[in-house]
Amino acid sequence: MAKTTKTRESFDKELFKRSVLYNIKTLYRRTLEEATPQQIYQAASLAIKDQIIDQWMDTQKAMEEQDPKIVYYMSMEFLMGRAFGNNLINLRAYEGVGEVMDELGVDLNLIEDQEPDPALGNGGLGRLAACFLDSLASLNYVAYGCGIRYKYGMFRQEIHDGYQVEKPDDWLVNGNPFELRRQEYAKEIKFGGYVRMYQDENGRTMFKQEDYQAVRAVPYDLPVLGYGNGVVDTLRIWDAEPINNFQLDSFDKGDYQKAVEQENLAKQICEVLYPNDNHIAGKELRLKQQYFFISASVQTAVQKYLKNHDDIKKFYEKNVFQLNDTHPTVAVAELMRVLMDDYYLEWDEAWDVTTKTCCYTNHTIMAEALEKWPQDLFQRLLPRIYQIVEEINRRFNIEIVNRYSNDHNASVDEKLRKMAILYDNQVRMAHLAIVGSHSVNGVAKLHTEILEKRELKDFYEMMPEKFNNKTNGITQRRFLMHANPLLADWCTKKVGDGWITDLTVLKGLKKTAATAKAGKEFMAIKKKNKERLAKYILQHNGIQIDPDSIYDCQVKRLHEYKRQLLNILHVIYLYDKIKSDPKFDMPKETFIFGAKAAAGYRIAKLTIKLINSVADVVNNDPDVNGRIKVVFIEDYRVSNAELIFAAADVSEQISTASREASGTGNMKMMLNGAVTIGTMDGANVEIVGEVGKDNAFIFGMSSDEVIEHERKNDYDPMSIYNSDAVIKKTVDHLIDGTFSKDKELFRPLWNSLLNTKDTSKADTYFILKDFHSYAEAQSKVRKAYEDKAGWAKMAMLQTACCGKFSSDRTIEEYVKDIWHLDKIKI
Ligand code: CRA
């Protein structure tokens, strides 16, 4: 990390050192020599926090003076990853702290490893929120991340006998040194009861929630540092506490009962993150979580605005709410409630403010991820909010009728059926989000097109002006600078350090790096990173892998649509080839997987077991002779992801076309010089656009072809199986005892491809259909890798061409097209 991270003048090494030693003494009554690594980590974090606090206060002051517009990024998930190293990088103090630690005889890496990964997110959606906060602060915008302080984040994954076992992620056991509890900003949140209507003394019709259960939302603030600019934004996550009205001397049985219930509610709400990615479980507690953090955040935003503005009708001029998927959509109704019930706005006035404030991002077209709540549950839990949703729906239905009743090409009934917010006893959250927002965006070009042409076609037709695309991005500060310091330094040597705040600067590598010498340097760095990962894998898996082999990596959530099964079937196919032809010539290849499966997702969990079973057989078969190895990395998360991205040669992005809205792991791998093998899906399309199709290995059906097969319902995997001996043999290894003594163990996976009972449910993700095209692309990868110089050039081009995929670019687009924020000066 030497050259790229100049120590910022304001970072005082001596002060830092003294403060670490002092903290160790006062916190633990110990000397440095006596302190454990965890204690040194805590002491060092507090010393850094000290410096952050000054900048945080300066940012607050600048905000008050300059009164910029603020974005509230509302999200159930923020997958921040470790804060320690990232804060040092953005403070430009990484190098300085490294030196201090050296002087103290302490290994900085060991200290960083003391921090648990704050895993308050499932995957892409939560990590995107984290990258966005990093970019917002780095670009001098004022932003609040609003979320939940789950006591238990994404579970810790252990592998026992090849199976996933979920262990609680007790990330707060040692406390969180960077957080600040802000009791003074606590809010009351009300659930249940009924709504009483009455006239107030001015003759206004008022609505009051009565006989409700309440909990207290207490915010914890985490600093979000901009890179080297002194800006510190805030991630505000809410914890629930009981309201203190528990009176033990109460003889009223009803009160006692209620007090106990309220206490239990407070205990439950923030207990745990639902571990589902792209899938909605529909649990009542989840809706409580949603309303809990949204009500607290909306109340806060309004009160903050009114502290130094008096016209609530202009709220939207200074505030914007970005809803990260439909999970925070109750914000639409909650803002209406606050504006009408607390600040006496008329419906139309409140609606004007609300729609001008709210914006919605769609992250998926997967049907099982579409949020719908049973109307009665919604009404029982949120009686006042439900009334408001009913009225929004009533008015929207009138709009539909007005718009289409004279349109001979449309049927009003059909439009109502397809577009109403309340329909079939359900509350359709996506419809509420679209109607209540002035902007609706998808997360990659192809995804937005699919939304406009298919999934949200009716809405697009009626309100095209709301729709826009914002292709996702990632922050280079974490995923190059922190993850891959060797490559970061190399880039700086070649093109200067401008890329840290403007990733397009890396395009300068195209010229300077197109030489054989640069290629060798690049691949030498890759090799070092591959050794680093090999060491991690040896330590954690006990498997020795060869840093000279191709590292082919698929790391992401386990989901059928992401097709880890296609990947492992191809490994099985290669294994067969080696077994039947002992001389089969191929470069050594290591297939690396990392994935968590939702706890209740049976097929996904069985896929993990399959990968591990294949690994056992292949890695231990002398006939294979080290040509292929398979590794499943336990507990895939942000911290080990950084090691994997830096070491990857090949980036597996093989979802069924149309299913992956964007993907962001694809961008992280590209940034680190891994070449994509993938389908024309999500942001892969744009990656190929940037790097050129000769520098990627594209295979499989297009999204149009997939959608067409689904429309016609004419896909028959069984006929492929019956007519294709290679596929038959490969697939049958799932049930012929090759990978398990119990031949029936993997039968459900075999069935998922060839379901003989219900053929419409067979191979819904077109694995067999795309198999050969994938195997061919894999064979091209191996061939390309054998040309060392050619590969080096292709790998470098990935890094050179990934400028577009910085979340800085994404954020500037949100600002320009939707948010219209002002930059603050510090
Ligand atoms: N699961 C998509 O599937 C996308 C991210 C971030 C996802 C990814 O393709 O990159 O969002 N969708 O936009 C999602 O969570 C609820 O939908 C994801 O992370």
Image (cartoon, rainbow, N blue to C red):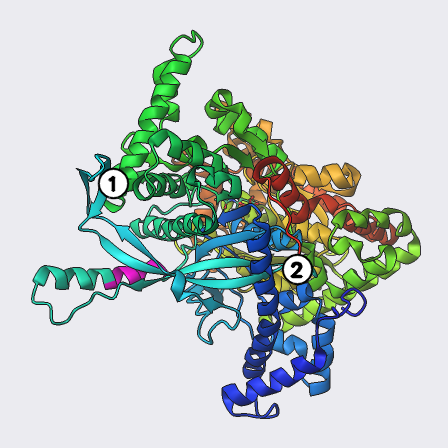
Q: Which residues are magenta?
A: 263-270
Front-most of residues 313 and 753: 313
* Residue 550 image position (x, y, % from top left): 74, 57
Which corner quadrant holds the N terminus?
bottom right
Question: The residue tagged with tag 1: helix, strand or loop?
Answer: helix
Q: Earlier in the sequence, mark 1 or mark 2?
A: 1
Question: In the shown orientation, is residue 680 left or right of residue 437?
Answer: right
Q: Residue at x 59, y 27 (%)?
A: 704
Question: Label 1: which residue?
Answer: 379
- At label 1, the amino acid type is Gln
* Dominant secondary structure (helix, strand or loop) of the stretch shown in magenta: helix
Question: The residue tagged with tag 2: helix, strand or loop?
Answer: helix
Q: Residue at x 53, y 31 (%)?
A: 719
Question: Which quarter of the picture shows residue 57?
Answer: bottom right
Residue 266 colored in magenta in the image: yes
Within 10 Å of the Cα at label 1, are there few (<14), some (14-19), or many (20+) other Cα atoms? many
Picture layout, residue 761 above or below residue 253: above
Question: Label 2: which residue?
Answer: 478
* Residue 723 image position (x, y, % from top left): 57, 33
